[in-house]
């Protein structure tokens, strides 16, 4: 019998960044996240996302090496979300991809090249 993992419902995603001040500015202004706390001696901060108990941790490193998992946030209107990104000159990776009757996806990048995505649930549109 294997041990059960007791999750508490929270999720923290860590992203490497080259400049903590600039990254905090970008994540708060572009994505609307809120700075939760900052520890300059560790080059670390956490921001509250609009998703309950989901935070994004930013780790200042000399040379960010983006990659790994891609945080994907649900939005109610993906076209409006794309327009908001465009208003901030965010680098967007192509067009909105649609998987019929399932989901619409939009990939984009923060200033350090970390990939993020928005999704719009299409499975409930009958």
Image (cartoon, rainbow, N blue to C red):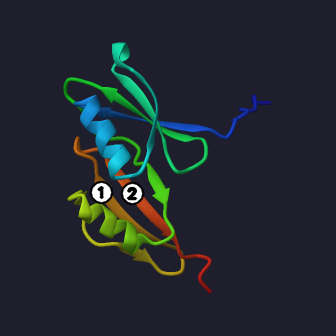
Quarter where residue 45 is shown: top left
Q: Position of residue 116 (x, y in %)?
A: 36, 52
Q: Residues within 10 Å of mark 2 (few under 14, many from 20)?
A: some
Q: Is residue 37 above or below residue 116?
A: above
Q: Are marks 1 and 2 in contact (CB under 8 Å)?
A: yes
Secondary element under disc 1, as helix, strand or loop, is strand
| Residue at image location 71% in from the left, 32% down from the top | 5
| Residue at image location 54% in from the left, 76% down from the top | 122
Quarter where residue 58 is shown: top left
Position of the C terminus, as image quadrant, is: bottom right
For disc 2, the marked residue is 117
Left or right: where 57 falls relative to 94: right
For disc 1, the marked residue is 108
Secondary element under disc 2, as helix, strand or loop, is strand
Left or right: where 21 falls relative to 1: left
Q: Residues within 10 Å of mark 1 (few under 14, many from 20)?
A: some
- Quote the CA–CA distance across marks 1 and 2: 6 Å
Q: Is residue 48 above or below residue 58?
A: below
- Count up the numbered dots: 2
Q: Residue furthest top?
A: 41
Q: Position of residue 23 (x, y in %)?
A: 29, 38
| Residue at image location 50% in from the left, 39% down from the top | 55
Q: Position of residue 74 (x, y in %)?
A: 50, 61
């Amino acid at each position: 019998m294997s041990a059960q993992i007791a999750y508490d419902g929270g999720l923290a995603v860590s992203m490497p960044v080259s400049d903590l001040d600039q990254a905090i500015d970008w994540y708060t202004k572009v994505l609307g996240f809120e700075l939760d706390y900052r520890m300059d001696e560790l080059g670390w901060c956490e921001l509250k996302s609009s998703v309950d108990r989901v935070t994004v941790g930013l780790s200042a490193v000399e040379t960010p090496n983006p990659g790994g998992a891609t945080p994907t946030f649900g939005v109610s209107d993906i076209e409006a979300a794309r327009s908001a990104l465009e208003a901030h000159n965010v680098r967007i990776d192509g067009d909105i991809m649609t998987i019929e009757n399932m989901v619409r996806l939009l990939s984009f990048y923060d200033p350090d090249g970390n990939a993020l995505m928005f999704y719009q649930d299409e499975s409930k549109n009958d």
